[in-house]
Image: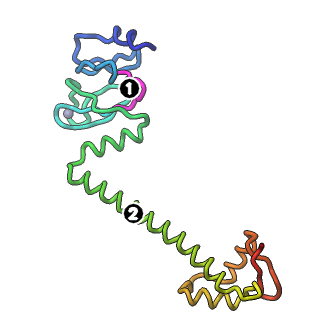
Amino acid sequence: MKLGQLRTTIPRSPAYCACSRIGITYISQPLEPRTFARIVDEKWVLLKCPCGNFFGSSLGSNTSCTRCSNSKDIVTASSYPSPEKLADAVSRSNMPDEISNEVSKRLSKIETRQNRARERESQGRESVISAMREATGQDGIMSLKSVRESLIDRGLKEVDPWELIEDAEREGILHRAGVEAWRWVQ
Ligand SMILES: [Zn+2]
């Protein structure tokens, strides 16, 4: 649908009109063509009532304030591609600033914690591999006993040497070289 066609169908006089024929909601403030095109694209809109309440709506549905039921002078604050994104925007917009800041602060804390956990995990893998290298003798062979000792030396007590070796075997890193003895795959 061309923008020009749409604009000619928008009634000029009423302050508010849910124009179901073309599936859009006309909101009292005249919309700039650019804004209008964007809203057509993203059909979940964040609306603001003169009472200060923000609420969400999909284009084409009734737009009356969820707090005071007013349907005049409703303005479109922004638009979103999905109802989930819109719901998030509605709750953030209605939050007092200090709460909104608190929420973002908490979210970034969670992110930092997750990053640290990921870092620890990769460091853990590195130390396990160095422990296995350390457990390898001059002959290129490591035993269950030497791996266990090496893990304990590095403070990796929670790593089961048997499981570790089995995993390494399965991944094709080690192959068996005798009773409780393994060699690195070249
Ligand atoms: Zn209201």
Residue 166 x/y as whole percent: 72, 77
Viewed as shown, does residue 101 lie left or right of 130?
left
Q: Is residue 158 magenta?
A: no
Dot 2 amino acid type: Thr
**Most distant residue in the left direction:** 51
Dot 1 amino acid type: Arg
Dot 2: element: helix
Question: As displayed, is residue 89 above or below residue 126?
Answer: above
Question: As displayed, is residue 10 above or below residue 126?
Answer: above
Confirm if mark 2 falls within 8 A of ligand 1.
no
The residue tagged 1 is 38
Residue 170 x/y as whole percent: 75, 71
Please provide the residue range marked out in magenta: 36-45
> In the depicted view, which residue is nearer to us: 68 or 2?
2
The residue tagged 2 is 112
Q: Quadrant of residue 152?
A: bottom right
Q: How many marks?
A: 2
Q: Tell me the quadrant of the picture where the C terminus can be found.
A: bottom right
Dot 1: element: helix
Q: Tell me the quadrant of the picture where the N terminus can be found.
A: top left
What residue is rendered at 37% in x and 20% in y? 24
